Image: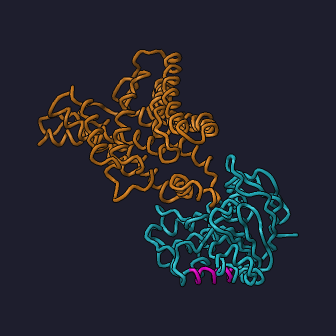
Chain colours: A cyan, B orange
C-alpha cells in the first residue's frame, strides 16, 4: 500500500512507555485524525514519525520506504513536513523569513518563491504581513504561517500537531477548511493530531483514537463520530 | 577638546577589536549555549599561524588571511570533535550545563601549552601593516595613527560582510533559525549540527582577525590575548550575549569607556574599570543594553 503505514510503533521516554505498539495506516490523499486526551501519546507519535523522537521498536513506512531512524531534515527532503506543537514559527524572524525557511534546503530558489506565492494565495493575510516580525502575528496568523512554512517545502505528507490549540472557533474553522482544501486540491496526505475531536473528525476520512499510548479504536471518521461508547469514553461527552 | 577627540578615536579603534572577540563569543553562545573560553586559545593559535606567515612573507594581509582560515578550521574542529561528543554524552542535568564550559577552559590551557611548545614563551611581534605614528594636526601630534584607521576599516569590512551574510543569505537565515529554534530549523530541513559547526568556524575566523589586529600594535605570547577574551566577554555581556548588534555596541562603549579611564584617570584603573562595568551591567541590566521588555529565552 502506498501512503503511511505504521506498524507496532513503540516509543519510550526513559522508563516510561509513551507509545506501546501503535499500528494504523493512512492512504495517499486522505486525512487521518488522531484523537485522544492529554498525555495519550499523540504528540509523541508525530515526533517519532518526523524523526524528532527515537522509536524503541516497530516500523513506519511512507510510500513503502522506512522513515523511522531518519533525521527530520532528511525526511523533509522526502516530502514529510511536521508542524510541531504550539504554532511552530520562529518569532524572531520576519514572516517572509519564516516562509523562506520552508524551502531553504532546496537549491532552486525560484521554486521556493513560487511556493511562497501559492501560500500567500492560500492565506492572503500573510501577504500583508510579509516584512513584519512573526512576533507581531495573532495566534491564528501564526498557525497559518506555521502551516505555510511547511507547505513551502512542498510536502506530500503533513503531520499537524493541534493546530486549533488556543484559537477562536471561527479561526479554527478557517484553518480546518484550508486543510480540507489542501487534501482535495493538492492530494496531500494529512495526519492531524487533535484534542478538538468533533471538528477534526468532521473533516477527516479516518479517525484513530489513542489512549495511554495504545490505539483503542480506529475506522471511518463518520462512524467514529456516531459511536456512543467512544463518545462517552474518549471524547468526553 | 583635542584630548576628548583622541580619546574617542582611540576608544573606537580599541573597541572595534573587542567587538570581534565579543561577536565570536556571541556567535558560539547563540548556537551552542556555551561561553567559549577556548576562544582566546583558538585566537592565539590562529594568530601564531598568521604571525608565522606574515613574518616569512613579510605581508601582513597574507598572515591575516591565514589566521582567518586557521581560526575557522580550529573553531569548526572544536565543535566537531569536542562539543558534539560532549553533548552526546551529557544530554541533561548539571553535567550538560557545566561540562562544555569546563571543557572550553581545559581546551584553552591545552592550546596555550601547544603554542608554547611550538613557538616558545617569548614575546613575538608582527610588523604593522601601517604606520603607528600619530597624525599631526597643526602643531600637535595625536596618538591616533594610520594603523588605527586601518584597524577600524578592517573591522568595519568584516562587520559589514557578516551583516550581509546573516541578513541576506540562506546560510545566514539557517544560522539564525538554528540559534533561535533548533527544532523548528531542523523540521524546516536545515542540517542544524552542520550549521552549528559553520557558526563555530565563523566565530573562529573572526577571533583570528581580532588576534592579528591586537598583535599588530602589541606583542604576541601564549597569554597575550587573555585580556582580549576578558574584554570581549564584558562587551558581550553589555550587549546581552544574544545580540550581535548589541555585542558590537557593547564593545565600542567599553573601548571608549576604558580609553577615557586611561586618558583621564590613570593606567592602573583600566583593568578594574572593565570589571566595574561588567558588575554594574550585571546588577542593573543583566539582559544587556539591547534587551526590550522580557527576555526572549533563558
Residue A229 shown left or right of residue A127 in the figure = right
Assign the magenta stretch its main secondary structure: helix
Q: Is residue A130 visible?
A: yes
**Can residue B56 be seen in this snapshot?**
no
Instruction: Indicate yes or no whether the magenta region holds residue B30.
Output: no
Magenta span of residues: A172-182
- Say if A129 sits above or below B208 in the image: below
Horizontal and vertical percent position of residue B230 = 36, 33
Residue B149 as seen in the image, left or right of residue B32: left
Residue A222 x %, y %: 76, 84
Seen as rendered, the residue at the extreme right is A1
* Quarter residue B231 falls in: top left
**Count of numbered circles in the view:** 0
Expressed as whole percent of the image width and height from the top left, the position of residue A91 reads 48, 63
Residue occupying image coordinates x 85% and y 69%: A2
Q: Position of residue B73 (x, y in %)?
A: 57, 36
Is residue A179 found inside the magenta-colored segment of the image? yes
What's the residue at 73%, 54% (across, down)? A11
Vertical placement of residue A56 versus B54, above or below:
below
Amino acid at each position: 500500500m502506498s501512503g503511511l503505514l505504521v506498524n507496532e510503533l513503540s516509543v519510550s521516554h526513559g522508563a516510561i512507555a509513551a507509545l506501546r505498539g501503535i499500528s494504523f495506516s493512512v492512504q495517499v490523499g486522505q486525512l487521518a485524525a488522531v484523537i485522544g486526551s492529554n498525555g495519550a501519546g499523540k504528540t509523541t507519535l508525530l515526533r517519532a514519525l518526523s524523526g524528532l523522537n527515537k522509536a524503541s521498536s516497530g516500523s513506519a513506512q511512507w510510500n513503502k520506504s522506512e522513515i523511522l531512524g531518519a533525521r527530520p531534515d532528511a525526511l523533509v527532503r522526502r516530502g514529510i513536513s511536521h508542524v510541531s506543537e504550539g504554532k511552530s514559527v520562529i518569532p524572531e524572524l520576519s514572516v517572509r523569513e519564516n516562509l523562506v525557511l520552508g524551502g531553504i534546503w532546496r537549491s532552486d530558489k525560484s521554486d521556493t518563491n513560487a511556493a511562497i506565492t501559492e501560500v500567500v494565495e492560500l492565506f492572503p493575510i500573510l501577504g500583508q504581513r510579509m516584512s513584519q516580525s512573526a512576533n507581531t502575528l495573532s495566534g491564528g496568523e501564526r498557525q497559518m504561517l506555521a502551516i505555510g512554512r511547511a507547505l513551502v517545502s512542498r510536502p506530500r505528507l503533513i503531520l499537524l500537531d493541534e493546530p486549533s490549540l488556543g484559537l477562536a472557533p471561527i479561526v479554527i474553522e478557517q484553518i480546518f477548511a484550508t486543510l480540507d482544501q489542501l487534501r482535495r486540491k493538492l492530494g496531500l496526505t494529512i495526519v492531524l493530531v487533535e484534542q478538538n475531536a468533533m471538528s477534526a473528525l468532521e473533516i477527516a476520512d479516518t479517525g484513530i483514537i489513542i489512549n495511554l499510548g495504545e490505539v483503542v479504536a480506529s475506522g471511518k471518521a463518520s462512524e467514529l463520530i456516531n459511536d456512543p461508547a467512544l463518545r462517552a469514553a474518549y471524547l468526553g461527552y | 577638546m583635542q584630548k576628548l577627540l583622541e580619546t574617542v578615536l582611540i576608544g573606537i579603534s580599541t573597541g572595534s577589536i573587542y567587538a570581534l572577540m565579543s561577536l565570536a563569543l556571541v556567535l558560539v553562545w547563540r548556537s551552542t549555549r556555551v561561553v567559549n573560553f577556548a576562544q582566546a586559545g583558538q585566537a592565539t593559535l590562529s594568530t601564531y599561524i598568521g604571525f608565522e606567515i606574515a613574518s616569512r612573507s613579510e605581508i601582513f594581509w597574507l598572515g591575516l588571511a591565514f589566521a582567518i582560515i586557521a581560526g575557522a578550521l580550529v573553531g569548526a574542529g572544536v565543535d566537531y570533535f569536542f562539543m558534539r561528543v560532549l553533548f552526546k554524552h551529557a544530554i541533561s542535568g548539571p553535567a550538560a550545563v557545566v561540562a562544555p564550559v569546563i571543557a572550553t577552559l581545559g581546551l584553552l590551557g591545552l592550546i596555550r601549552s601547544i603554542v608554547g611548545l611550538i613557538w616558545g614563551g617569548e614575546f613575538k611581534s608582527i610588523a604593522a601593516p601601517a604606520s603607528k605614528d600619530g597624525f599631526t594636526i597643526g602643531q600637535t601630534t595625536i596618538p591616533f595613527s594610520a594603523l588605527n584607521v586601518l584597524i577600524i576599516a578592517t573591522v568595519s569590512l568584516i562587520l559589514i560582510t557578516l551583516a550581509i551574510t546573516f541578513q541576506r543569505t540562506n546560510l545566514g537565515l539557517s544560522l539564525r533559525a538554528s540559534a533561535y529554534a533548533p527544532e523548528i530549523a531542523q523540521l524546516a530541513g536545515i542540517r542544524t549540527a552542520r550549521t552549528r559547526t559553520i557558526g563555530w568556524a565563523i566565530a573562529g575566523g573572526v577571533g583570528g582577525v581580532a588576534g592579528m589586529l591586537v598583535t599588530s600594535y602589541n606583542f604576541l605570547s601564549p597569554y597575550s590575548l587573555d585580556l582580549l577574551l576578558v574584554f570581549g566577554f564584558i562587551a558581550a555581556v553589555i550587549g546581552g550575549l544574544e545580540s550581535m548588534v548589541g555585542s558590537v555596541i557593547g564593545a565600542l562603549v567599553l573601548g571608549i569607556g576604558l580609553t577615557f579611564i586611561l586618558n583621564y584617570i590613570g593606567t592602573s584603573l583600566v583593568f578594574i574599570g572593565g570589571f566595574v562595568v561588567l558588575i554594574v551591567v550585571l546588577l542593573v541590566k543583566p539582559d544587556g543594553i539591547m534587551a526590550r521588555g522580557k527576555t526572549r529565552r533563558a
